[in-house]
Amino acid sequence: MHSATHQAIAAVWRIESARIVAVVARLVRDLGVAEELAQDALVAALEHWPREGIPDKPGAWLTTTAKRRALDHLRHGKMRDDKLQQLGADLEAQEALVVPDFVDALDAARQDDIGDDLLRLIFTACHPVLSAEARVALTLRLLGGLSTHEIARAFLASEPTIAQRIVRAKRTLADAQVPYEVPRGADLAPRLASVLEVIYLVFNEGYTATAGEDWMRPALTQEALRLARMLAELAPGEAEAQGLAALLELQSSRLAARTDREGRPILLQDQDRARWDHLLIRRGLTALARAEALNGGEVGAGDVLPGPYALQAAIAACHARAATPEATDWVRIAELYAVLARVRPSPVVELNRAVAVGMAWGPQAGLDIVDALLDVPALRNYQWLPSVRADLLVKLGRYAEARAELMRAVALTGNARERELLLERVAALPAEAS
């Protein structure tokens, strides 16, 4: 019985923890303290629920308990600061005696604007004052409800490393006196970009793992998709929030088709499109339509440049709409990558454009772009550069050169499944044509 109750508590905590931390952080204005008080509420549930039964509204029970812990914390802090022996037993009497900040906290405790609370938590956990690694770890901890062990396992890092990263992130936010708020006006765009980047980084690490034995880490992709949906719902007027949600919905739709039963990778052109999740495709296309409406028209068609996530979603939509690989509109994809290269120029974007150009206008056109990237320092250890170059060389019948490029990619990859795929491609190469 207790085991079933504990499982139920764990499930409720995973769903509700972000909201609880967000509510408490609004009161105490300190993420570290907020998480501790929320954990106190979890401990109380572990003590009471096995004995008294699971309440009808377990999330509300946890939130109320955490709020009470927060108010107790504020009262004790007030007593320490002013060296008061007693504030009185009656809450109304206490409110008359305390400073305005504490009164504001008590008033806030009676409100349940969960949406604003979650937005504040997202923007605080993803604050640019933190490194990208710290933002990712803190976001997964506070908004994803993942344990330190789960985060460490997902990123193939040690638990002490992740724990220290989270502790330092909380300390940095406190030392920098980062306000617990949703930025407004000119401050919103750069802060929103940081939030979107964190979710995007989490998804990408899950979609194609950089190291380890597995091609994908589905738990990370699911968590990123959940966060993207949450942000899109909380910020319906932000085109890039809708664009990121669209992108992750569309990319997630292919997850089941990206590996075989043994977990070996299946590249896009070889995937069984019947295994794509068409509900996620519809959700993605709907989110893309919202982004386009906010941007003033179809992505890439007007004078106003859309953001990078809406552009990538439009590219993903080209694949999603194609019933067969041959039906893919590679010309449109190449054009979208050209726009993306203007919006967010990077060697990786240019490499992806080379793939699209090669599919649209022939392998030599793609190879010309790739060859211009060979001396770019950022791609020196990027396994996909020799891999893409090998694919284009194969199409041109230059098999010996393709073999050398594939072996270079094998040496660069840190993912075991990816290495197997590359070696299979090497083995499948025909002899050099005479």
Image (cartoon, rainbow, N blue to C red):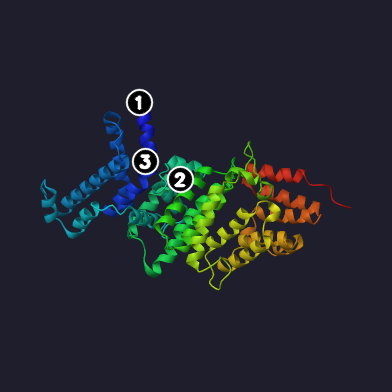
Q: Amino acid at mark 3?
A: Trp
Q: Are marks 1 and 3 in contact (CB under 8 Å)?
A: no
Q: Read off the residue under disc 1.
A: 1
Disc 3, SS: helix
Q: Position of residue 259 (x, y in %)?
A: 62, 42
**Mark 2 vs mark 3, CA separation in Å:** 24 Å
**Quarter holding residue 261:** top right
Query: In front: mark 2 or mark 3?
Result: 3
**Quarter holding residue 101:** bottom left
**Mark 1 vs mark 3, CA separation in Å:** 18 Å
Residue 83 shows in this picture: no
- Say few, some or many: other residues with alpha carbon within 10 Å of mark 2 (under 14 / 14 to 19 / 20 or more): few
Q: Residue at x 72, y 60 (%)?
A: 358
Q: Which label is found at residue 13? A: 3
Q: Residue at x 68, y 42 (%)?
A: 420
- Say few, some or many: other residues with alpha carbon within 10 Å of mark 1 (under 14 / 14 to 19 / 20 or more): few
Q: Are marks 2 and 1 in contact (CB under 8 Å)?
A: no
Query: In front: mark 2 or mark 1?
Result: 1
Disc 1, SS: loop
Q: Read off the residue under disc 2.
A: 161
Say whether disc 2 or disc 1 marks the residue closer to the N-terminus: 1
Say whether disc 2 or disc 3 marks the residue closer to the N-terminus: 3
Name the one closer to the observer, 398 or 313.
313
Image quarter of the N terminus: top left
Residue 233 shows in this picture: yes
